[in-house]
Amino acid sequence: MSCNIIAIANQKGGVGKTTTCANLGIGLAQEGQKVLLVDCDPQGSLTISLGNPMPDQLPETISTVLTKVINDASIKAREGLLEHSEGVDLLPANIELAGLEVSLVNTMSRERILKEYLDSVKSKYDYILLDCMPSLGMLTINTLTAADSVLIPVQAQYLPAKGLEQLLQTINKVRKQLNPKLKIDGILLTMVDSRTNDAKEISQLLRETYGGKLKVFDSVIPHSVRAAEIASYGKSIYAHDPKGKVASAYHALTKEVLKLETKRQKSKSDLIR
């Protein structure tokens, strides 16, 4: 199987992107997939939530390797990569990435810097998940240019339709100008509080608004205090609360993502026939 690169994106903060990136990634690893998680946010939330509480002290990060790509310098095997005890690799990020985003503006092929790096390592992985920063700046354009598909976490409390519109416009632009193969895997409803809002209603609304153009995942991620705690433990929800409802929701999402890929492979081979 070829490597699948998925950007977890939404320019709105606090919708569960990082939690989804970590738990979907570790879920895929539990299903026997080789997984690389890439922190593309200068705040380093993914890096922190996977057990590196002081990202600014890490000697090598995504900034290290992207600077080398920009300068045409050679990158050592596994440079910058950290191994997580739950079977995934992590390319961490810290505040240096904010400075790098500024310098990207004057770089040749500036939208393709991340893609160039990932092209050099993707043969070692089945899945690479990119945790995007909450903005539509140059770093997010880099992730969308490098990705095969986008998974969009959306908080179920209200419909952030305006924000979603903007993200979809950006995705369309990237498709037209930089990455014609970019697909949208679907919208994932997160932080669903079954007592106060009806996720069914919201997903119904989403389906109506985007009229069959967008898949809404069957799995919904429930709101949970335990899920919010995991960032401070440096472990996934499977290690922290394996019997809980959030772990089972992410397990279901993992199965859906794998099924999606199987379906794609099948339609590809049907085309070849």
Image (spheres, rainbow, N blue to C red):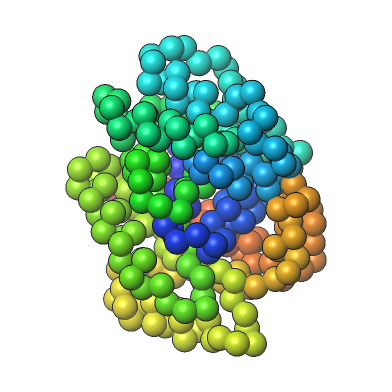
Left or right: 183, with 221 as reference point: left
> Can you see residue 195?
yes
Left or right: 48, with 79 as reference point: right
> Across the whole image, how many numbered discs are drawn on residues?
0
Against 117, residue 183 (above or below) is below
Q: In which quarter of the image is the C terminus?
A: top left
Q: In which quarter of the view is residue 50 placed?
A: top right
Against 204, residue 101 (above or below) is above
Q: Nearer the viewer, residue 71 or 217?
A: 71
Q: Which residue is drawn at 41% across and 72% down?
A: 160
> Can you see residue 146?
no
Q: Residue at x 58, y 53 (%)?
A: 18
Residue 97 spot, x, y in % from top left: 49, 34
Q: Which of 170 and 247 is in front in this view?
A: 170
Q: Residue at the left extreme?
A: 176
Against 24, residue 207 (above or below) is below
Residue 6 spot, x, y in % from top left: 46, 47
Q: Nearer the viewer, residue 202 or 251?
A: 202
Q: Which of 164 and 145 is in front in this view?
A: 164
Q: Residue at x 33, y 81 (%)?
A: 208
Q: In which quarter of the view is residue 180 placed?
A: top left
Residue 187 spot, x, y in % from top left: 44, 65
Residue 183 spot, x, y in % from top left: 34, 53
Q: Residue at x 50, y 23 (%)?
A: 65
Against 71, residue 9 (above or below) is below
